[in-house]
Image: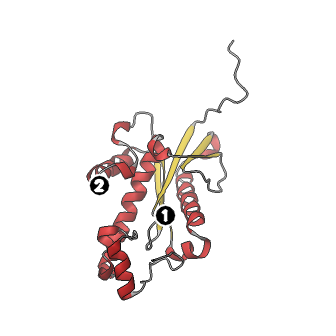
Amino acid sequence: MEQLSLFEEPIYDITIGADEAGRGPLAGPVCAAAVILPSDFPFEILADSKQLSEKKRLAAEPVIKQCAIAWAVAWASPAEIDRINILQASMLAMKRAYLKVASQIDLKTSSCILLVDGNRRPDVDIPCKAIVKGDATVHEIMAASILAKNARDRFMVCAAVKWPQYGFEKHKGYPCTAHKAALKQFGPCPIHRITFNWD
């Protein structure tokens, strides 16, 4: 009989992947998603959302939502970002997404692990592992990154209708030259992150 290593990773029944979008912008919420995928998912449509074209991200989204065992999107607001900082707000959004997924399935009868992109872990009630560049290597995290990115982009396009002077539909709140110029001209709107450096 083959002897198992004491350091061998345990095997889990369910893998939940989570990722966030929107840590770097000067405006808007941070969005997170959590996803559980079946073994027969068409994994070839997945990749790091930052490496996919918008067309491919949008095409992958309905497939993820239709085929996933469970999925959820959650948010942390600009006010929460200002109050607890962007890192903690990102962890909070991922925890909220995880809790939404956990409410959809019976985790008590299965062994589960949450895999998140990056080097920090949210505070959750199951084993959790942070994986640097996980959005490029773990399918569940890739799927979560796509859902989070698409959801946040849609939010910022809607925000552009309410505050057209900032051009949110183009830069999604990121600190480009045009956005910084608009901030200097008009000042912040209610979804700007007041604690961020706008220079």
Q: Is residue 61 left or right of residue 87?
A: left
Quarter-of-image position of residue 113: top right
Report the mark closest to the observer, 2 or 1. Answer: 1
Image location of residue 11, percent across then percent down: 61, 32
Amino acid beneath label 1: Arg
- Three-letter amino acid code of the residue under disc 2: Glu
Quadrant occupied by the C terminus: bottom left
Q: Residue at x 35, y 80 (%)?
A: 181
Q: Does residue 42 show up? A: no
Q: Position of residue 108 (x, y in %)?
A: 64, 45
Look at the picture and state if 41 lies above or below 144: above
Occupied quadrant, residue 109:
top right
For marks 2 and 1 on the same chain, the one whose residue lies earlier in the sequence = 1
Which image quadrant for residue 41?
A: top left
How busy is the neighbourhood of tag 1: few (under 14 within 10 Å), some, or many (20 plus)? some
Disc 1, SS: loop
At horizontal 55% and vertical 72% (from top left) the residue drawn is 81
Quadrant occupied by the N terminus: top right
Residue for badge 2: 54
Furthest-right residue in view? 6
Residue 112 position in % (x across, y down): 61, 42
In the displayed structure image, the side of residue 62 where residue 73 appears, left or right: right
- Dot 1 corresponds to which residue? 23
